[in-house]
Image (spheres, grey):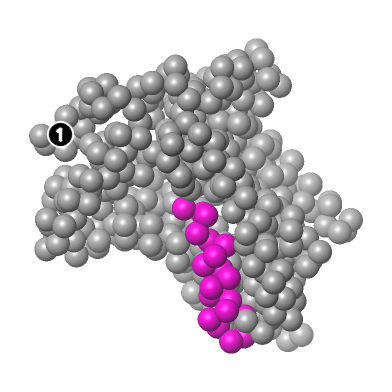
Amino acid sequence: MRANLAPCSLVFFISLIILGGVTVAWGPSKKFDPGGDADQYMAIGQSLKSGNGFKNLVGPWPNLSDYSRMPGWPAIISIALRLAPGATPEAASRFSNVVCLSLAGAFFCLLCRFLGVGTTLSEAAGLSVSLSPSLVYLSVEGLSEIIFVMILAMGVTALIASRRLLWLAAIILGTATLVRTNFILVPPVFLALALLMRAPRAELLTRVGLRCAILACALATAPALLWTIRNAEITGRFPLLSSTEGESLYGANNDVVANNLEYWGYWVMPDYIPGETPKLKLAHQLGCDLALNDYYHRKGVAWIRNNVGALPRLEVGKFVRAFVPIPWKPRLESYVVFFCRFLLYVLWVALLPLWFPKMNRTYLLFCLAMAVIHLITTTLYYGLYRFTHCYIEIFLVPCIALGLQQWGTKRAGI
């Protein structure tokens, strides 16, 4: 373990310097889009820091406890605001992401070492994650995907490193649900896939045993369970992770995203749907976030039922948005980001015969579970490259690193 400290530290500090410089150049205190995801997370972080509780200060109900947003990212922002009381909330958000993304790169470096990749390639893999153009953009935009990637990197590294770290891995990975709600399905899907496949089943039963595997999956749900209990005390409904599901469903299944090429397969604010009551007005009419969620959920389900013929075209749009690395709007920065994504796919496929036989089966099974959940989410809701990058694409990096190592070994005739 000590031998891996130097390369991981190198990745962390190089990433920290570069990402810090990019953030300064971007403008640390540059305002977020009013009412956008980053703005809402920041507002809740400010509320937590001031001791006012978990309240969305820019939402329709700024004086009520919020249950629309997950607590992971606002909690980190509140810590940053306490550690740097003179910083603007925007700067605290962005520099928190700098640290989290640097840590993610360091843990991917460590993960690659445990997967059998050499030091130099592991360092390159870690840097390719922390300096991924997609993640750098999400970092400076103050979005929550960065801490999600960091948690995954830490949890999967613990999962692969040693059987003795199984419980720690379960707890760490369980906190990922406090950032992205659909991750709650990954542990049970992981276990189900392991039991359905002969080789993974034999490895699972030999390495940890069925009882321990089930207990680990249960432990991974503990953070989400605590959050649903908190929400139940506020709303009277159990289980409830977040009240944004209805808006996500309706915003991703409507006439606009089905027929307008600009938004095809994507998501729009319900306000942009013709004939829909503005959200703010509707919120005051309905009185609470849960009622608003239920209203949008019913609208989304009704549209799906009434437009079955439009679903195939819409689903194609969702998967194009999620997986095809072609910029929707032709901008130079978009071409850079999408070229890097395209390169990941090319290298992953080209090196597949070299890395697949050598790759840790537990790691592959985790990647498969992540992919399954992301595919289901894309089908039901909408396609977006930033989700695909965090759920699937960054996990191609260790495979590519191992493939390059095997290619180098084969070329040298060793």
Residue 381 in the image, given as x and y percentages of width and height: 32, 52
Name the quadrant of the C terminus: bottom right
Tell me which corner region of the image, top left, top right, bottom left or bottom right, holds residue 20. top right
Residue 176 in the image, given as x and y percentages of width and height: 58, 48
Name the quadrant of the N terminus: bottom right
First to last magenta residue range: 182-200
Per the image, the residue denoted by label 1 is 276
Residue 184: say if magenta.
Answer: yes
Residue 315 in the image, given as x and y percentages of width and height: 25, 61
For image coordinates 65% across by 25% down, the residue present is 80
SS under mark 1:
loop
For image coordinates 64% across by 40% down, the residue present is 100
Residue in front for this viewpoint, 182 or 80: 182
Q: In this rendering, is residue 54 above or below 6?
A: above
Tell me which corner region of the image, top left, top right, bottom left or bottom right, holds residue 248. top left
Q: Is residue 92 visible?
A: no
For image coordinates 51% across by 54% down, the residue present is 183
For image coordinates 67% across by 43% down, the residue present is 102
Q: In this rendering, is residue 356 above or below 260?
A: below
Tell me which corner region of the image, top left, top right, bottom left or bottom right, holds residue 84. top right
Q: Main secondary structure of the magenta part?
A: helix
Image check: 248 left or right of 203? Answer: left
Q: Residue furthest right?
A: 2
Residue in front for this viewpoint, 354 or 258: 258
